[in-house]
Image: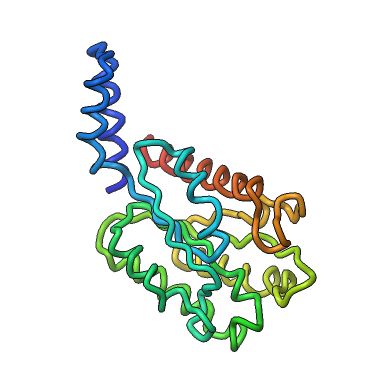
């Protein structure tokens, strides 16, 4: 569905160029006419999403896309935690948004034993349940799974070793089993402390790298499907 919307937008632009229409008023009218046809992007995640990259991604993608931020601070994949993402209102709002593209970046809080009660137990099944809920929308949604950013803080319960050895391998496994594309945010940030406010939350530079990585990956996927 998102491919059809993107092709429609491109088609309108090509028609305008061919006809040589330069009127500002006409351009505004065409933009308003096609605004319901934009590709809807839902960003699912925790505070790294809620306070971070979606706004930057929105400016990168432009008017053919509507980017909505459904991040919830402190949320987890695991349903056995203080704040399971699937129990939050944002989860239902994301489904009601009826997105064409779903980008999921969760797992950081699952690497914090003070938040997630039973560690990684049930993580994969809970992640599959989360993804299945978006598949159940019944369209042609494209889902992208993201590896969580590095945890560089040494003054908190967040554990990068646990993230690397336990959580990220399970994210990889879920993506492999469900044949979903995976975006390597961990590798993109490269454990560089200059990209963080506090060792857990990326700063503006870190968020820009996340947005750029998503931008490049999503567009390469769209280009492949359009050829």
Considering every residue shown, the one lying at the far right of the view is: 154
Q: Can the viewer see residue 4 in this picture?
A: no
- Using residue 43 as the reference point, say whether residue 111 is left or right of it: right
Residue 104: image location, x then y, percent: 48, 61
Asked if residue 113 is positioned above or below residue 142 in the image, the reply reads: below
Q: Which residue is drawn at 61% across and 69% down?
A: 108
Asked if residue 124 is positioned above or below residue 61 in the image, the reply reads: below
**Quadrant in the rendering for residue 24:** top left
Front residue of 175 and 29: 29
Asked if residue 127 is positioned above or below residue 139 in the image, the reply reads: below
Which quadrant is home to the C terminus?
A: top left
Residue 200: image location, x then y, percent: 68, 63
Q: Which residue is drawn at 79% across and 70% down?
A: 154
Front residue of 22 and 179: 22
Considering every residue shown, the one lying at the far top of the view is: 20
- Using residue 79 as the reference point, say whether residue 89 is left or right of it: left
């Amino acid at each position: 569905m998102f491919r059809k919307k993107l092709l429609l937008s491109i088609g309108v632009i090509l028609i305008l160029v061919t006809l040589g229409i330069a009127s500002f008023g006409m351009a505004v009218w065409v933009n308003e006419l096609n605004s319901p046809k934009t590709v809807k992007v839902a960003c699912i995640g925790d505070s790294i999403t809620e306070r971070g990259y979606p706004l930057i991604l929105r400016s990168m993608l432009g008017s053919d896309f509507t980017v909505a931020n459904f991040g919830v601070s402190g949320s987890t994949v695991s349903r056995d935690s203080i704040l399971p993402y699937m129990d939050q209102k944002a989860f239902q709002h994301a489904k009601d948004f009826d997105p064409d593209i779903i980008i999921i970046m969760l797992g950081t809080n699952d690497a914090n034993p003070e938040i997630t009660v039973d560690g990684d137990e049930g993580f994969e099944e809970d992640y599959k349940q989360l993804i299945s809920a978006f598949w159940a929308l019944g369209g042609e949604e494209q889902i992208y799974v993201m590896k969580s950013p590095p945890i560089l803080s040494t003054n908190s319960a967040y554990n990068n070793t646990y993230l690397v050895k336990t959580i990220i391998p399970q994210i990889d496994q879920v993506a492999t089993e469900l044949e979903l594309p995976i975006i390597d945010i961990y590798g993109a940030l490269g454990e560089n402390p200059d990209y963080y406010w506090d060792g857990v939350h990326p700063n503006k530079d870190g968020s820009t790298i996340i947005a750029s990585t998503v931008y490049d990956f999503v567009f390469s996927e769209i280009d492949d499907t359009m050829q």
